[in-house]
Image: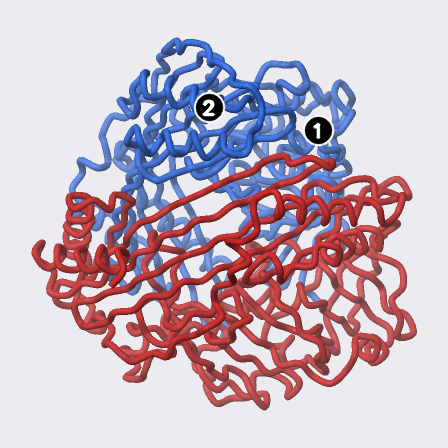
Chain colours: A blue, B red
Amino acid sequence: MSGLIDQGVAERALARALAHGGRFAEVFAERRRGQTMAIDEQRIESVQAGAEEGAGVRVVEGNTTYFAHVDGLDPGDIERAADEAAAALRAERRAPRPLQAREATPLPIERRPEEVPAERKAELLRELDERARARGAEIAQFTASYAEARREVAVANSEGLFSGDDRTRVRIGAQAVARRDGTVETGAETLGAHRGFELLEDDPGQIAEQAATKALTLLDAVPAPSGSMPVVVGGGFGGVLFHEMTGHGLEADHIQKGASVYVGKLGERVAEPLLNAYDDGRLPGEWGSDAIDDEGQPTQKTQVIEDGRLTSYLYDHLTADRDGVASTGNGRRESFRHLPIPRMTNTYIAPGDATPEAIIAEVERGFYAVSFGGGQVDPATGDFVFGVSEGYLIEGGKVTRPCRGATLIGNCLEALAAIDAVGDDFFMKTGICGKGGQKVPVGTGQGHVRVRAMTVGGTER
Amino acid sequence: MSELSATARRAVEAAGEAGASDAEAYASREAGREVRVHGGEVESLTAATQSGVGVRAWIGHRVGYAYGTDLSEAGVRAIAARAAEAAAVADEDEFAAPPQPAGFEALPGLSDPSLAEWETARVAELALTVERTALESDPRLVGVEMAVYADSDEQVAIVSSAGVAGEYEASSCYAYLQALAEGEGARETGLGFGLARGPRGLDPEAIGAEGAERALSMIGAGKPQSRSCPVVLDETVAASFAGLIGGGLSAKAVQRGRSPFAGRLGEEVASEAFALFDDGRDPAGPGSAPFDAEGVPRRRTALIEGGRLCSYLYDTYTANREGTSSTGSASRQGYRSLPSVSTSNLVVAPGSLSSAELLAQAGEGVYVTDVAGLHSGVNPVTGVFSVGASGRMIRAGQLAEPVREFTIAGELGGMLSAVSAAGAEARWVPFGGSVSTPPLLVAEMAISGS
């Protein structure tokens, strides 16, 4: 259990949490350690180290969750959180079930980043800087960041669950600014995983070159077109499109509040039969993977779309309870200071059998969105918007000029149903997903995907 | 001296012992609560306490940072030592130096006693009233995704080896809801919100009614035709854009060539109808405090006035680089972050037109009530943007049918020059930081729809 809290302390806290009633109680303990640094103007700066620990206790009675969190992991701190969570309840004392320790095997970490000297990380950032600037004099600026974080967590609940996990993530990001006369463009790239420093042993400098190349390419960009047209979405981070337009709408809290366009669509055709999609919290080493979710449930692979039919929503403990199903291991929280809610882990469209070249060759005039700066969706209405960070025109079945300033907008159900080709060039990318004020690491993935028609909002006059 | 200041002082001393030539500690303690309601019931009730310290250590002109929650003697010592270790990794930067102490005036009115006086049951009732008001407003208002009340009371202390020493306490609260309306085969959402120093400053009925009205007004929305036309930005949308402009006026963005406003000091950057200030001492502003995140007095700074760019926003480091003074614009997200330049409260100056007059002046155009995708659809270096939007058509100077799924595009500089009028009534909005702004009329913008 990572040695965060011992069983006796957890049992006593759960008993106190249920002192005034409640059908469910949970103690979540966490220790977070992290280091970040950056390079800007060729100088190492913003070198930071953080260390936090604390606990969150929740009690559920009826449809109400009572939650309290405190800093510190002393038995007294945890009991204080339990007492505060229980303070507003007025029912009969309940007894928690005895805890049964359930070992989860954390994802393997070969080289603990905290054991790598900070100077080595600074060296890495200097290397990124050199690699980016070597792309040419038009690279006017370059910044890069390094972040490592370790989260040791332990969960105990009144149903007898007692489990823990030890998670280490490493991520680097690169951003280049290219300048030619009055034109300024940016390009960004990231590399991250639920792994140790071994992630960076291959050739991390590649991301600096990729970021620089993107910025340089955009110097020749024309304003993006406007209007409805076929859109080919690139692999990897292109999967953020599916994450936003479908993944969020499948999170069971949105479904149960009627705030999703996918309400009542289980078992129905929502896409062409060529589409299969998953949420998989167990992909080895992936950014969105963990051994257990933040409620102690082992993570799993959940098929959400099978041959175009909607097959599952994504559940945490409480929403699963309400629907009389099992949790899909999607109960996640940013930290002990937050309540768990249904969240995606690694969400992706499974590889199809078309080549990217063939998918593009069939488009007479369209838009090619290689990468996004981010996206946003209102799950209730299904309206979404994506900022394209790297995009091109498709003319006569060929990728022609780069475009700047494009946004894709549309409605989830229509756009999902309009996916008419899925590529075989599958890969995953990392993202940080925000929901309800909580940020969690998520993976997105796919091969090239074509949407029959989508609205491109450009700046072309 | 409070316990918090004593903790900060111990951290500064420990950093010195760990090899720092100078150090600064920022300690905070916060107690907060949050109530979420759904379907007439309390869905969750959160009680939170947190405290921590962040230490900035200098070794000559190298700077490092560390933070933590362990405020015991040994814990603080460990945090201070890690800050000094971090400084040793950073590169030398001749402008990195500890801020010098300056006297600051107390700022009364930051703390509202009603926060402590209102028991949890009473603020839960406030949130339930927000939801109920929306649900009872119209049969087409089919639900409320969530209604939330949250508050916090924060104490802050800052101490440095250069002689900076200060403390303050501030309270804040807010309530909002996301209402769901249904009609013509589609669902629409509407946001209503309010901010105050304490719960007595919130009007739950007004918040509920706003969310309901926004959702209901969108029923039957279609896509507008692509065009260039006058656009009225409501307060929430104007605030989001003001926040982007405020970001571009940060001296850090300017000095590093990542701002569309770089090199334009004294130049005409906006129409005369658009004036922008940063005011860190307005008692109504959620971002107000007697001093900023590194102990420099907060103040009011004119940013754009008479159409001209008057000033950027500086913290101590960016001011050192230009040989000027800090504008008291260092901010941080609590003890977990290094201070960096940011707006405190942005204030867009109100004009003289009522909302009806603003629409009348627009004539034929679009009233934008919501934008989406600002974090991805705006290039902060160039100011070029293309964001998703929804709102209402303006026909013959009146609000007409709702529209959605379109984008508005342009670049920030062009937009500022095209602002032709500001409304007379401003409102505090929690978007784009903390912004007080009236609705704005932009003479021409590109709309991309069908």
Image point 90% across, 70% down: which residue?
Answer: B395
Question: Element under label 2?
Answer: strand
Quadrant in the picture for the N terminus of chain A: top left
| Left or right of B437 on screen, residue B264 | left
| Left or right of B185 on screen, residue B41 | left
Image point 42% across, 33% down: which residue?
Answer: A56
Mark 2: amino acid? Glu
- Give how far across and how far down residue A68 sits, in percent: 46, 36
When the figure is inspected, residue B30 is found, relative to residue B321, above or below; the finding is above
Q: Which is in the foreground here, disc 2 or disc 1? A: 2
Mark 1: amino acid? Gln
Tell me the CA gap for discs 2 and 1: 22 Å
Residue for badge 1? A256
Residue for badge 2? A26
| Left or right of A394 on screen, residue A374 | left
- Give how far across and how far down residue A277 sits, in percent: 62, 24
> Alpha-carbon neighbours of circle 1 within 10 Å: few (<14), some, or many (≥20)?
some
- Give how far across and how far down residue B94 sits, in percent: 19, 72
N-terminal of the two: label 2 or label 1?
2
Which mark is on residue B95? none
> Alpha-carbon neighbours of circle 2 within 10 Å: few (<14), some, or many (≥20)?
many
When the figure is inspected, residue B128 is found, relative to residue A387, above or below; the finding is above
Image point 56% across, 83% down: which residue?
Answer: B269
Which chain contains the residue that carries disc 2?
A
- Depth order, front residue of A406/A293: A293
